[in-house]
């Protein structure tokens, strides 16, 4: 592979490791205008404020000229990418150059300052380079920003006001490059570990779902067999009833039947009762075998509040509210207890917050009450997101359909499976005012 191809491949890996949405959010016109005003004010204070003038001694005009490339590049970059959702390859090159101009500006302040102030600014330069190393995933295999930092250091070194700055640059320069590469490498390794953990979690999740599906299938088969016994039970009960009626008549009219007929009726009665007992025993055995653990009572209000807190930490910009009916005790019956029910509710609330991957909800309402007709618990989750596509409302959750680029469709499917296994139901629809509406009906414990 030629050197050019090697560099191109490394550059592509670097751009793929970036978070374009985060970069574009930070590179808005407003933040850059605010930074421009802050830099001008900071330089004015460092140059003319009585105490700062003696400590730093930075010439205002020269420092402002050093800041000009950074400010011009940032403002122009933000204007060009104002309405874009992605950054082209040339935009990433521009970004690398822009970061280098930031490092040049901070390093030039260190070079132009008096030695006491230069030591303080050196720590600022070290922090800035380390932060950009982590943010932009700078590694020895993808050293594009590190090269820009080295060039910025060399250019700023030429502006030094005394030879005493030589030692400062000799210490801070290598330390800054090392911190930049170290934190960038650490961030890349963390990303890989997190991606591996997500893949493992998805694989385990899929395996659990497969097992749950097999359990539900066996339970459905057992229930079908149990229902198939109804005909046999009816016949056995009819035979036993007839024999009992005949024995009743014989008890009133003694001698109406001979000994042989009497014994035959008793034999039929015993056989029918034994058959009924055998079928009932088998039904109970199948129920114990396939139904799994007994449902456990779960206090619903504290569980919903815990979901509100945990999801709120992941989506701090989403307003999640919980409304619980007062008065009646809200205790759900769920196989697997509180962890299972929390998993169901969290899956559905997370889906609401994430939306379709491009647009998520800003408000999510969780309402819980006793459903007046059935007496079961009703939990309704309403959001103001994009809602369900019309064609997906009638489709089964087993299809694992998702609109999110990195989604698997497992959340809704898992929730529906777990609810069905506990005798509950999940209804999907779009809210009248927009957004999605999910309605869960869960068995309730009566005190």
Image (cartoon, rainbow, N blue to C red):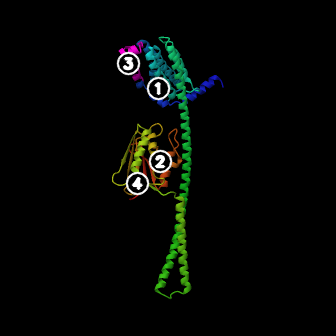
Q: Which comes sooner in the sequence, label 4 or label 2?
A: 4
3D distance between C-alphas at marks 2 and 3: 52 Å
Numbered range of the magenta stretch: 32-59
Q: Which comes sooner in the sequence, label 2 or label 3?
A: 3
Q: Relative to residue 324, is residue 158 depicted above or below?
A: above
3D distance between C-alphas at marks 2 and 1: 40 Å
Question: Looking at this rendering, what residue extends furthest in the left direction?
Answer: 327
Q: Which comes sooner in the sequence, label 3 or label 1?
A: 3
Q: Relative to residue 334, is residue 228 depicted above or below?
A: below
As for residue 4 lying within the magenta part, the answer is no
Q: Which comes sooner in the sequence, label 2 or label 1?
A: 1
Asked whether disc 4 touches disc 3, contact meaning CB atoms under 8 Å apart, the reply is no
Q: What residue sits right under mark 4 in the picture? A: 331
- Determine which of the numbered discs, if any, sits on residue 81 in the image: 1
Q: Residue at x 40, y 51 (%)?
A: 300
Q: Give the number of the mark in front: 2 or 1.
A: 2
Q: In the picture, residue 177 is in which quadrant?
A: top right
Asked whether disc 2 touches disc 3, contact meaning CB atoms under 8 Å apart, the reply is no
Q: Relative to residue 311, is residue 296 depicted above or below?
A: below
In the rendered image, residue 194, in percent from the top left (x then y), is placed at: 53, 37
Q: Quadrant of the C terminus?
A: bottom left
Specify whether 152 is left or right of 384.
Answer: right
Q: Residue at x 54, y 76 (%)?
A: 270
3D distance between C-alphas at marks 4 and 1: 52 Å
In the rendered image, residue 62, in percent from the top left (x then y), is placed at: 44, 12
Q: What residue sits right under mark 2 in the picture? A: 343
Q: Please tell me whether mark 1 sits on a helix, a strand or a loop.
A: loop
Q: Please tell me whether mark 3 sits on a helix, a strand or a loop.
A: helix
In the rendered image, residue 72, in percent from the top left (x then y), is placed at: 45, 18
3D distance between C-alphas at marks 4 and 3: 61 Å
3D distance between C-alphas at marks 3 and 1: 27 Å
Q: What residue sits right under mark 3 in the picture? A: 41
């Amino acid at each position: 592979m030629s050197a050019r191809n090697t560099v191109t491949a490394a550059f592509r890996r670097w751009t793929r490791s970036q978070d374009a949405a985060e970069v574009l959010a930070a590179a808005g016109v407003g933040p850059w205008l605010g930074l421009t005003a802050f830099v001008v004010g900071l330089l004015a204070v460092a140059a003319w404020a009585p105490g700062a003038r003696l400590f730093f001694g930075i010439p205002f005009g020269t420092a402002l000229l050093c800041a000009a490339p950074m400010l011009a590049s940032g403002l122009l970059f933000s204007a060009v990418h104002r309405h874009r959702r992605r950054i082209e390859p040339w935009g990433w090159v521009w970004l690398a150059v822009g970061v280098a101009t930031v490092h040049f500006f901070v390093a030039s302040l260190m070079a132009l300052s008096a030695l006491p102030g230069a030591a303080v600014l050196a720590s600022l330069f070290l922090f800035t380079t380390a932060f950009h190393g982590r943010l932009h995933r700078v590694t020895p295999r993808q050293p594009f920003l590190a090269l820009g930092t080295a060039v910025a250091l060399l250019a700023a070194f030429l502006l030094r006001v005394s030879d005493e700055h030589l030692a400062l640059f000799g210490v801070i320069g290598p330390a800054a490059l090392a911190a930049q590469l170290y934190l960038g490498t650490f961030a890349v390794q963390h990303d890989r570990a997190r991606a591996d953990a997500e893949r493992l979690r998805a694989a385990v999740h899929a395996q659990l779902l497969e097992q749950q599906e097999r359990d539900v299938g066996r339970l459905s088969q057992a229930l079908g067999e149990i229902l198939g016994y109804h005909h046999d039970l009816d016949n056995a009960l009819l035979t036993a009833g007839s024999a009992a009626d005949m024995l009743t008549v014989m008890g009133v009219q003694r001698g109406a039947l001979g000994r042989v007929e009497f014994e035959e009726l008793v034999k039929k009665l015993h056989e029918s009762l034994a058959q009924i007992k055998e079928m009932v025993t088998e039904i109970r055995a199948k129920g114990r075998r396939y139904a799994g653990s007994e449902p456990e009572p779960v206090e619903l209000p504290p569980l919903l509040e815990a979901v509100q807190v945990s999801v709120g930490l992941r989506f701090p910009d989403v307003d999640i509210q919980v409304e619980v009916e007062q008065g009646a005790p809200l205790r759900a019956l769920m196989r697997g207890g509180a962890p299972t029910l929390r998993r169901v509710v969290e899956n559905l609330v997370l889906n609401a917050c994430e939306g379709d991957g491009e647009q998520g909800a800003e408000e999510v309402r969780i309402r819980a009450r006793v459903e007046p007709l059935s007496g079961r618990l009703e939990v309704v989750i309403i959001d103001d997101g994009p809602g369900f596509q019309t064609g997906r409302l009638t489709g089964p959750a087993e299809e694992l359909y998702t609109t999110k680029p990195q989604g698997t469709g497992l959340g809704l499917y898992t929730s529906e499976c777990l609810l069905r296994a506990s005798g509950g139901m999940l209804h999907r629809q779009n809210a009248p005012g927009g957004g999605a509406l999910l309605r869960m009906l869960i068995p309730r414990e009566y005190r």
